[in-house]
Each structure stands twice: as C-alpha cells, then as structure tokens.
Image (cartoon, rainbow, N blue to C red):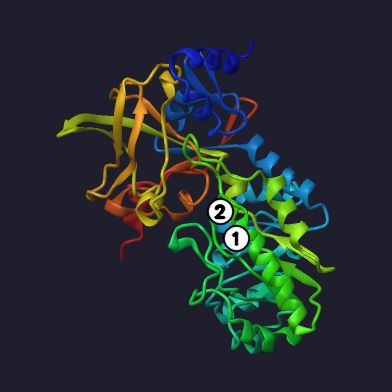
Amino acid sequence: MAARERVRDDDRVRAPGRLRMLDLFPDSARVDRGEIVIGGARTTDLAKEFGTPLVVYCEQTIRARARAYREAAPEALVVYGTKAFPNVAVLRLLAEEGLGADVSTLGELRFAQAAEMPGNRLVVHGNNKSDEELRAAAEALAAFVVLDSVEELDRARAAGVGRMLVRVTPGIEAETHESIRTGQVGSKFGVSPEDARRLAPHVDGLHVHVGSQLLALAAARESVAWLNRFVRDLGWTPSVLDLGGGLGVPTQPGETAPSIAEFVATLLAELDLPVRVILEPGRSLVGQAGVTLYRVGTVKRAGERTWVAIDGGISDNPRPQLYGARYTALVANRADAAPTGVYGVAGKHCESGDVLIDLVELAEPQRGDVLAVPATGAYTLGMASNYNGVPRPAAVLVADGDARLIRRRETVEELLAREA
C-alpha cells in the first residue's frame, strides 16, 4: 500500500480532517515516514539544502493544470497570468505545454521573452501602459494588446501595435474580496460599455475579467452572458473574445472550487458567438502547485493564545493582510501526528498584523520544526517585499526526486548594494 494511503487510513482514526488537508497540497504530495514529500523530495531535505522560507513548486501539478486547460478548450489561446508568479522557469515549462503569457508590464514581458515565449502567444495588458511598453509589445509581435482607455488607441497605433482588444467593464460584482474585483462599475480597469462601443470598430475583439480567486461559477457565467448581449446590441461581431481568468483554488480544508474542466465548460457553454477565445488563468495554474516551507522559531503563550513564530511572514506573503486570505498548515516533519492544540502562526516582522494564519490545529510545534503552508504558489513571491530589510525567499521546482533552484534567495548584501 502506498505511503499516502497508509497515512489516510490512520487519519480516519486519529484526525478525520487530515484527509482534506493533504488534498490542498500538490498532486505529488504524500506522507512518508511521517514527513511530507513533494515531487519525490523530502521537505526537511529541501529546507536544509535551500534554507527557509522556501517556496516549493511541483512540476507535475503545473503541467497537469496546463493540460487540463488545453483539453477543456483545445481551440482557445490559453495564456498564463504572469503576475501570479513571474518566473522564467515556470514560463518556459508552460510554453512547453502550449500556453502563452498574459503580461501587464515591461518587466513581465521581458520575463516571458527570457523564457522564449513566442510572440503570437503574448497578450499585453495594463491600465496605464507607457509608450515604451506599447513599443515593446509591438516589437515583440504580441498577439494582442488590450486597450484599457480610449486615449490608448492612438498611442498604440503610433507605437506600431497591430492587433488590439478593448477591455470592457460590465458592472458585475464578483463574489471575492473587493481588492481583487475588477469588473464592477468604477473599477480602475477597462472602459465603460459606451466607450467600448466607440472603440469596437477599431479593434479585433473584447476582453472582460470580473475578478480573481473565484470559487463559484456565477460571476464568470454572468460575464459571458453579458458579452453575448453587448455584442448583439452593437451589431458588430468581434473575431476574438478574451474571457479573462479568475478561477480560484481552495486554501483551507472544507473549501471547494470548480474544476478547470467545469469552469471552462461553463464559459464556453454560455458563449453563443462564433469567435476565437482567449483564457487567462493564473492562480489555478500555480496556486496549488506551490507550498511554502518555514522554520519554526519561538513558541509562546500570550493570554488565551499560543503563538508559533516563523522565519517569514508579511514580506513573503502579504495576502492575509491585503485580502484577508486564509491558509492552513502542517508540521511537515511530523505530518502524521495528531493535532495537540490550536495555534496562531505569526511572522517575524514589526507589525501586530503580521499574522499568516489566525488559528490552525497543529501537532505541538517545536523550535526547528518545518511548517508547510499549502496553496501558496500564486501571488506570494510575486508580491513579496523587503520589509524590515528581509531578503526575499528562494523557490525550487521539484520533479522525480530532483529539486531545481528557479529563484535564488536574496542576500542582505544585495539589498545594501542598491543603496546610493
């Protein structure tokens, strides 16, 4: 019997909730001799070799998610939302699977080019593109530049941009945190339906995206239905419709999300226009593929709460503070041990709000333990900072027992070298 199966049998007796916990980890994750193994690599070995905090990406999971999108929409152009984790190795891997890249800055464009992403698989976004960024998009022979304002049309033409879409704001409020809603009236993204009507004769198609970390289908379905009506009212048939991304991933036991196949099928079934489709997944490609490893430091009682302090926090994952994101964790080196209590997981930074996990059941944490936080592959390292002068973490890609460094850890000396 496989190690993962053995652990799950034990969990039915000792910790029923653990079955759901392991499902938040990458596809290759299992427990062997009490320790979490990802991509055939033991988490304690990874922490020892590469240090902590460390984001571990599972190649098998990323490839599986990419293939799920390609299988669900074989005729669509599927482009990775690079902002989820801009990384050359990940972009190169996705290019191998036939995906392109959705980039929103010159920096993200350069990452995609460094990964040798073909220009005809690039979609360039941005609500405030500079002339330099427009010229770079034209030079890259990007498949499409997505206009985000009326005045951008003339600047894009002057820069030599060829094919264009216009991002329209449909006035739909997705069920997600207000900071990652993008389709509501008053959003900083896109143009009004009235402005889109003016731009339509000058572009190849439309783009709509209502938000991120969507765990239900209603908003995505509504956005496509809105596009159907809008296009019919225009009396103009676009050649391309970019339906955006937004599919979320569970980050805690008990949460659910539509599968990639279900999400894409819902969008395509709602669409009744004979157009080419573009999809822009980000989080659903890399979110579950990533696990952050931390080293446990101080464990102390404070009033009614016991705090477990880790060697990272708000600088490597600001999402709990920005969006109220909620995570869970396991003591990676004692993953099959039953929980002994409820703990708060705090970072090392000078902020009372530097709390990664408010409450989580853990086997009694001890100094030196490795804490594994799943579903952290998206919008963690991509949003990391140097708060308190802390260097940003490393990242590794694991497969078949091999771990490859794909982003090296910063050093304090590198931070000081930037000082003038």
Label 2 – label 1 distance at C-alpha: 8 Å
Q: Are marks 2 and 1 in contact (CB under 8 Å)?
A: yes
The image shows residue 264 at horizontal and vertical percentages of 72, 52
Residue 71 visible at all: yes
The image shows residue 54 at horizontal and vertical percentages of 44, 37
- 200 lies above or below 326: below
> If the image is split into quadrants, where does the C terminus sit?
bottom left
Residue 77 visible at all: no
Q: Nearest the camera: 224 or 39? A: 224
In this rendering, the label closer to the viewer, 2 or 1: 1
Please give the name of the residue rendered at 63% of the width and 14% of the height, measured from the top-left corner: 2
Helix, strand or loop under label 2 = loop
Kindly indicate the quadrant of the structure image that contains residue 338. Answer: top left
Please give the name of the residue rendered at 58% of the width and 34% of the height, measured from the top-left corner: 26
Kindly indicate the quadrant of the structure image that contains residue 100. Answer: bottom right
Amino acid type, callout 2: Leu
The image shows residue 290 at horizontal and vertical percentages of 53, 40
Residue 214: mark in rendering: 2
The residue where tag 1 is placed is 219
